[in-house]
Amino acid sequence: MARTLDDFYREVLWRTNLTTSDLPYVYASGGNYGFLQLFGDIYKYLVQTIVNTDQNFFLNRSYDSLVANQEIYFLPNDLLRLRHIEFAFDGVSWYPGFETDPVFFKRGAEQTVVSAASMAHPFFWLGDSITAPSSPYHIAPRPATGYTNSILLYYDQMPSGLLANHISAATSAASAKVIFPGEYEYLIPLGVSIEIWGKYGVREQKADEIQRYQKAINDMKNFIKPRASVGQKRVRDSRELNLRDI
């Protein structure tokens, strides 16, 4: 069962012998770095380590709806990196979108309202970045008719509880579930604790724990990396990936 932010907070306090006054859960304006900020730093590092090892580990897909004559849409707010977009301009037949550079895009016939001839050749271009949550993107041609769930996006998903730089400072966020490979969840509070030990100048006394952390990261990378032979790629559990069936 996925652990909560508060679970990790309590473990960090236990590992570091700090109190809630020494390490506040929430960052106070003008005060010290709080637990949420430390958690965000370590969690993002570990998630990126996983993504760099297996690019499909946090792969997710979601649907959006086409709106008649609308060109601009927005990427999911839990997006880590965009991978692929498909469109069903008639609400039935799916076609892959081709990314284009708007500088060279011909804004004539290509940006007209979709026709039967152009339906199978959709284009899109990003208004910001493939790693920017809620970033706008443009599509062409524009849909003639709106259809529900007629845009399909494949993307690397930010695990719940992270939400990029938007970690809530509200105490209620303590109950948020943290999605991470269960057998390596202990790396999160251990990594936060190592940062704290560095601040207090006790890293040398904790050398064994730091070595265990570094070894465990390598073990995790070896465990999740794609296998080369058929039948060797492991099955992930529902805590790590939750793709909806089409």
Image (cartoon, rainbow, N blue to C red):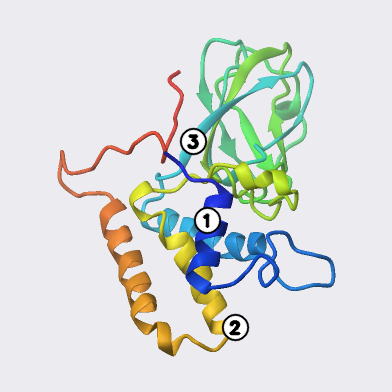
Q: Residue at x 51, y 19 (%)?
A: 94
Could you tell me the amino acid type at mark 2? Lys
Q: Residue 10 placed where, x, y %?
A: 55, 58
Q: Which residue is mark 2?
A: 199
Name the residue type under label 3. Asn
Quadrant for the N terminus in the image? top left
- Alpha-carbon span between mark 1 and mark 2: 19 Å
Q: In the rendered image, which residue does mark 1 sit on? A: 8
> Could you tell me the amino acid type at mark 1?
Phe
Residue 103 visible in the shown view: no
Please say if 91 is above or below 191. Answer: above
Q: Nearer the viewer, mark 1 or mark 3?
A: 1
Image vertical order of residue 35 relative to residue 201, above or below = above
Which element is circle 1 on?
Answer: helix
Is 3 placed left or right of 67 in the picture? left
- Which one is in front in this view, the residue at disc 2 or the one at disc 3? 2
Circle 1 Cα neighbour tier, 10 Å, few/some/many (<14 / 14–19 / ≥20): many
**Label 3 crowd bin: few (<14), some (14–19), many (20+), radius 10 Å:** many
Answer left or right for 132 relative to 53.
Answer: right
Quarter of the image holding residue 126? top right
Decide which of tag 2 and tag 3 comes sooner along the chain. Answer: 3
First in sequence, mark 1 or 2: give its number. 1
Q: CB under 8 Å between callouts 2 and 3?
A: no
The residue that label 3 is drawn on is 60
Secondary structure under tag 2 reads helix
Q: Relative to 67, is 182 on the left or the right?
A: left
Report how many numbered discs are placed on residues in the image.
Answer: 3
Specify few, some or many for label 2: CA neighbours under 10 Å numbering under 14, 14-19, or 20 or more.
Answer: few
